[in-house]
Amino acid sequence: MKVWRGIPTLSDKQEHEYRQALARLDKYSKVTDSQFSIPLTGIRFGIDPILGMIPIIGDFIGLLLSLPVLIEANRIGAPARLKRKMIRNMIIEALVGIVPVLGDVFDVYWKANTRNTALLRGWIQTQIVPEQTVQKREWGVIVLLGVVLVAMLAGLIAL
């Protein structure tokens, strides 16, 4: 374990794991949120807004595509507070995305996966000199998202 001014810091292994996680999430966020561009406009979008154009199920699929970022955050031990913010971003994108046309435009600009990757990056940067306590992995916030997914699926089936 490395020590900085008497405070334990990340081990080389943890730091490497965090860097790898961010590299994976950067690639994933690019594909889902900004892989393509509209020439001469600077507007970038990924497969998430494209899927959002599929009536009814597109935004549900988009919400499912946001799960890997949340799962990675949980895997590396991000705090529940951060994961709740990530879930909020995912739900906002899914709920606004349901609105025809406006939701599709919103998806192009909101970019939940990119936002969530940035949130995780910010948290990781604070871990360079971490608190003395270890963050425990909390599955409760992921269960909350599962309930939202089931509710959306039930709504789709009811339609």
Image: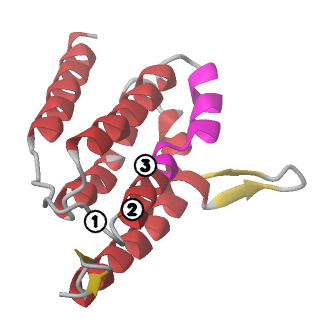
Q: What x and y, as percent, mark residue 116?
A: 43, 49
What element does badge 2 sit on?
helix
What element does badge 3 sit on?
helix
What element does badge 1 sit on?
loop
Proximity of marks 3 and 2: CB atoms separated by less than 8 Å:
no
Let me know if residue 83 is in the magenta part.
no
Three-letter code for the amino acid on which mark 1 is drawn: Pro
Between disc 3 and disc 1, the foreground one is 1
Three-letter code for the amino acid on which mark 2 is drawn: Thr
Q: Is residue 22 left or right of residue 67?
A: right
* Magenta stretch bounds: 102-115
Q: Residue furthest front?
A: 5
Q: Residue at x 61, y 56 (%)?
A: 34
User: Would you call the spot at circle 1 few (<14 residues within 10 Å), some (14-19), or many (20 or more)?
Assistant: some
Q: What x and y, as percent, mark residue 85?
A: 36, 36
* Residue identified by numbered label 2: 126
